[in-house]
Amino acid sequence: MSQFKYYIFVFLVFFCSLAFSQQNGEEDPDRLSLDLQNLIAQAKLDSSRGNYFEAKDNLEKALEIAIKIDDKSSQGKIHTKIAKVQYIVDEPENANISLNSALQIQREISDYPNQAITYNIKGLLYSYKEDYTTALDYYKSSIGLFEQEDLEEYISEVCLNRAKALIALERYEEAKDQLERAIIIAKQYDQARTLSSALIQSGRVFSELNNNDLALNQAEEGLVLAQSEDLTSNVNQGYLVLSRIHEKNGNYQSSVDYLKKHMDLSDSMLNIKRDNLSAESNGKYISAYKSAENRQLQEQIDEVSADSNFTRITTILSIALITILSLLTLSLYKNNNIRLKTNNMLHKKNDELIVAKEKAELASKTKANFLSTVTHELRTPLYAVTGLTNMLLDEDPKEHQIPHLKSLKFSGDYLLTFINDILQINKIEANKVELDPEQFNLKNKIDNVISALSNSANDNGTTLHYNYEDDLPESFYGDQLKISQILINLLGNAIKFTKDGDIWVRVNKIHQKDKQYKLRFEIEDNGIGITKEKQDHMFESFSQGSVQINRKYGGTGLGLSIVKGLIQILKGKIYLKSELGQGTTFFFEIPLEYAEEDKKQKTVVTKKSSKMENLDLSNFKILVVEDNKINQMITKKILNKMNLYCDIVDNGEDAVERVKTTEYGVVLMDIHMPGISGLEATRIIRTFDKELTIFALTAVTLEDKMHEFDEAGFDDIISKPFKQEDFEKKLFAAITAQNKVTA
């Protein structure tokens, strides 16, 4: 009753202020702002009562006022609210237009919280269209913005929507993770509606994963909560899910009972909504009810309750089936009774194994997600570092600056490779990383590593000693990049834990047969050393000598794990010798094939000549689609240095519109952006332009998802940060292939 009085008061204030303003002929901003809030409140009340068209009318009036007083924030919110109503009354195209209007305003004023809400509604809209892949992109963007703004309480609903899309795609393990997060947040913030729905959907997921007991428990808990909170829609959802679970478990009578409850409640809800809609929209709503997800449901209802004869036949068959099963159970009772205790014990053990397995899988996923997030964030600044370094080296730097720039370039190249290996640490542990053998000079390679780390050693007051065995060949055939990574990790560790001391790097031959050599590498230091009890765990991921060592010296504890994995891939072995306070020696042995030195490799190119200089690029345009401002600047500078003109947009929607109106030779498309992803934007472009060259420009290593790039329609992939030579080579090939430029 108190809520009713509140709305009466709001309406009186609204009408009094309206009458006063009309009488005085004024356009008072404060009065208009009050009118705006009253109209929004009235629209909310209309929606809660099912009066959607009245709600839409009030929101449109509110929008007119927001435009009149230039309230951008309210304009964006109202467009989103209008879209939500349009979505409910089955006007998806109009809803999409309203959402795009909302996003345009919210991006303009950096209204990230409401932009996140709009992305969530966008996701619902694409789920309604059964375009679940695009919906997932929007849900991911929504969660990202909510996390950015520290608005955790809003994330539960998006996780729930995301889980529903994953269920539709039959990606049940991923859906389970999203539902677990939704349940945790909903409980924390007392969100009964989201919690009950998440529990019910969790029951559905566990049923699909054949965990029938947990499926039943979750769904029943969600239904009880929905009933206690009078959440009719969730109750109806719970009836349907429980019907399916009981059917899968063979409890056909319970399945029929729940399905009947679902049918009755669905009819009741349909009648209520039909009454709330205007006469001219009744037919349209009923049509919508029978479409999309509800069409399949209606067919199921029709099959089960086609007529009373079918119902009677079903009942008779159910009774007969139950009777047969009862007789069979009695006949097998004695035999089963003997096995009962054994089976119970096995079942208990099996449950424990399942729980342990699920915990291990969760831990593995958490670790993989952490590594993926961290490495992606590192790549963004690294793109700027390597890009600017290459440009500075090409701009005739002063002679004393060249060594510093080269050292920076070497470190950047190594860091990029290191990041890639961290991202793929699970692959390394699974021995799935491929070798990339080539001819190289081993002695020079070790020289470069020592030179790159010499500054760090000098800072610690540590002297580096290098001994390369006499008569040992220098030129070998092998994966030089992985050998560099191993040496940098081990030598870097030695420097970190050795202050005012010495470090020795030694390379010796163990044995030789024809061109096959087995070499031993030693990295010895006289630093702090490692205790005996810690030595057995040093090669495990995230392992450090102790908490105190971690705090004092830093590091992630991943280095030695990666080293061990790489050495195993190289068909070698590693071991260590250490005493606390006396220092540490790491030994690793790997096979390498001798290769006769290629004199051509010693040829030094003093001045690089770009092939682009021979092309007429005056009419050739490139579109860069990138949301990061630093990356935009770096990419533009690199392209301008090649005499290439480019336009820049910061989201997928604008990219699609630009391609429709402007002729571009190449599109450089970032993958992860707010709104639709680069993958989805490319799919849309391919619906009307099959010939345009589109490169995926991404800061994430996605070897496992290469098929997605092919399916989306990309011509090639350029991984950020990229080597300028490789970037230029790919652009040159694309440009000359189009016959749009002349040499």
Image (spheres, rainbow, N blue to C red):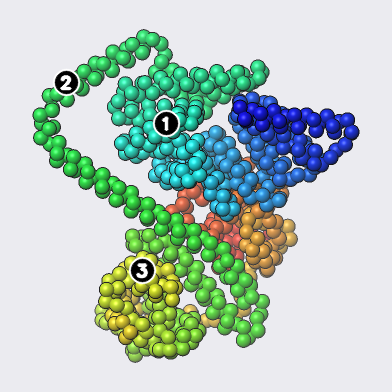
* Image location of residue 27, percent across then percent down: 85, 38
* Label 2 vs label 1, nearer the camera: 1
Q: Position of residue 106 (x, y in %)?
A: 68, 47
Q: Tell me how far mark 2 sits from mark 3, CA to CA.
A: 60 Å
Query: Residue reaching furthest right?
Result: 24
Residue 96 placement (x, y as % from top left): 64, 37
Instruction: Confirm or deny contact between disc 2 and disc 3 (CB under 8 A).
Output: no
**What kind of element bears circle 3?**
loop
Discs 1/3, front: 1
Q: Residues within 10 Å of mark 3 (few under 14, many from 20)?
A: some
Q: Nearest the camera: 552 or 99?
A: 552
Mark 1 or mark 3, which has the lower sequence index? 1
Disc 2 marks which amino acid?
Leu
- SS at badge 2: helix
Circle 1 SS class: helix
Q: Which residue is mark 3?
A: 543
Q: Label 2: few (<14), some or many (≥20) within 10 Å?
A: few
On residue 327, the disc is 2
Q: Nearer the viewer, residue 36 or 611?
A: 36
The residue that appears at 66% across and 80% down in the rendered structure is 396
Q: Is residue 712 left or right of residue 497?
A: right
Residue at horizontal 55 percent and vertical 18 percent from the top: 271
| Badge 3 amino acid | Ser
Mark 2 → mark 1, Cα distance in angstroms: 34 Å
Q: Quadrant location of the C terminus?
A: bottom right
Residue on which the image places disc 1: 223
Q: In the rendered image, which quarter is residue 370 located in?
A: bottom left
Instruction: Tell which circle, 2 or 3, labels the residue nearer the N-terminal end.
Output: 2
Q: Are marks 2 and 1 in contact (CB under 8 Å)?
A: no
Q: Position of residue 139 (x, y in %)?
A: 54, 44
